[in-house]
Image (cartoon, rainbow, N blue to C red):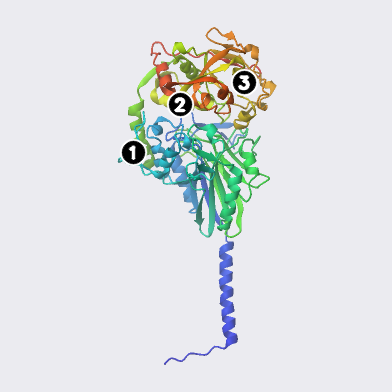
Amino acid sequence: MKNYKKISWPVLLLMISALAGCTANNTSRKSEAPVNVKIIAFNDFHGYLKRSDNAELFLSNPDRPGEIAQVKVGGVAYLATLVKQLKEQNSNSIVVAAGDLVGGSPFISAFTQDEATVSVLSQIGLEVSAVGNHEFDKGKAEVLRLQNGGCAPGKVIGSETCIKNGAFQGAQYKLLAANVINDDTGKRLFPATYTKKFGDATVGFIGITLKGAPEATRGAGGLTFLDEAEVINSQVVKLKEEGVDAVVVLIHQGGSTSAVTINDKSCPALAGEILPIVNALKNVDVVVSAHTHREYVCHDRKTGVLLTQANYYGNVVTDIDLSVVPGKGVISKSANSIPVITDQNKDVPRGYRMLTKDKEIDAEVQFYDDLSKQKSAVILGYTATALPAIDIEGSNVRNNNAEHLIGDVIADAFLASVPREFHADIAVINPGGVRSGLNRAGPVTYDDLFSILPFGNNLFYTDLTGEQIIRMLEQQWEQQNCRDKPLTINKINMCGRLLQPSATLSYTWDVTRGPGKPAGKGDLVLVESVRIGANHEPIDLKKIYRVVSLAFLSEDGGDNFGVFKDGKNLQDLGAVDIDVVSAYFSRYSKNAPLPKPVRRISCPTCPAIY
């Protein structure tokens, strides 16, 4: 029998107390040690597995103050390399996105029903994303399929599904949509939040789709979109009750600045629909935004929120660093926009570096590219001139308030497709319906046109009076479209959405009359200048004119052109936009190519680019 030494009660109590103290001190030290978390974010990828031909960014040159360097960017194989490099800097990292990963995609992705993009983004490590409006382009059943997998039902013209091993697994990342309610069930279509632990710290992510999604896509039927800020704040409360230390919002809504180069953190002229949402938030640390295709890193003074957006098409990644104290929250946060610079550049400014392609991802892209080329390389016609969708010189911003040559041609094609017995007068297309341009003269392939018109919209006509056509033109610059598409050039307010017109509609407008007025108050169009028809006759305000456009405008009054809903005799023409434009180009041969279209819109008071 062993002999045990007796310990007196006072000594035993002292020992227990000391042990308890050690435990408490260790716990305290553990919980107070900050955890550094890296969030790698992008948005509005839109299926651009390959670099867009005109994808360039403007960078400041630290060695030559005032000089701006222009670099080629984009391509998912380069994006994958950058993501790997950033993840190697911190094991506590996560890749996130803010929606519109698919929809409006070029042919390389669209011919697979965007399965190609979903698969590749899963491979590069994307973990969670908000749902954007374009994820809904083909309806709620299709976006659920992209998440859950399975082949698309039925045969979709021009598309194939399950082309790899006869199956499609669905996204390996989680889609979030806290404010989207399925009307059939009364429940959320996707989860509201996603949480992840990094050491002892927990970060919660809330996914939000813009409330105005039904006006931005035709596929939002059967869904209810709730107020963004109200839903975010309610989800923050739940996350905090669950012990989350930091809250990051992934939202498909955005703003803009007037910055010329990326990483201008002074955020000049920050504006847009995202601001009232951010200003209403409580206990949110970071807002990763999207939708407006802009780049910015801004700190909201009122809420302390770090607000970011990463351009579009995978051209930029936002590198966000948080220092999080478990149980206490975020003690510091910062972000930088990192351009996805390709090795096609000769050199780049100091502080930036060129990337090489990730070989595995490049091989995957090549697989889809080879298949798509077999389907899309057929030459449809020829053009005598480049037909670009212009960008503002010295800016990273697509100009939605300018007349684009490719937009003119598309509108002409729409009008030319209407049988004579229908007596159509003019045609228009919204600038958002024109996704890119033709940046060179010469042959035009199906792939070229699909990159420009990827949505497969039906053509409609509707009858509007001359007075309603003036209203249609004024709605281009009224308050809502100015908020949605803000733009300043040479200190001139150039906000708005300019409809691209057929040659049978011409007019002059005056920017000095001030865009951004409330609905019904616009007076920018010089009414006496408006001409309609093949003979360019002055508009008759009482006469009825037949207007051809996409279903998005004619049927839905999309992009805030509500006057279309007041039209009469709405008629589906039974034709799809890309088919109509393909047929139009087929009229023009190598020896007799499509000539440069004549401008239809004049603005003598606009900046020189106009």
Circles 1 and 2 in contact, beta carbons < 8 Å: no
User: CA–CA distance between discs 1 and 2?
Assistant: 24 Å
Q: Residue at x 55, y 14 (%)?
A: 545
Q: Is residue 426 above or below residue 295?
A: above
Mark 3 residue crowding within 10 angstroms, few (<14) / some (14–19) / many (20+): many
Mark 3 vs 2, N-terminal side: 2
Q: Position of residue 24 (x, y in %)?
A: 58, 70
Name the quarter where the C terminus is drawn. Answer: top right
Q: Are marks 3 and 2 in contact (CB under 8 Å)?
A: no
User: Badge 2, how many Cα within 10 Å: few under 14, some, many 20+?
Assistant: some
Structural distance between the alpha carbons of marks 3 and 2: 24 Å
Q: Which mark is residue 457?
A: 2
Which of the two discs, 1 and 3, sits closer to the camera?
A: 3
Is residue 238 something one can see in this rendering? Answer: yes
* Location of residue 584 by image quarter: top left
Residue drawn at the location 49% of the way across and 48% of the way down: 191
Which sits earlier in the primary sequence, circle 1 or circle 3?
Answer: 1
Instruction: State the residue in front, 407 or 233.
Output: 233
Camera-side residue of 262 and 571: 571
The residue tagged 3 is 471
**Element marked by disc 3:** helix
Q: Amino acid at mark 1?
A: Cys
Q: Amino acid at mark 3?
A: Arg
Disc 1: which residue: 162
| Labels 1 and 3 touching (C-beta < 8 A) | no
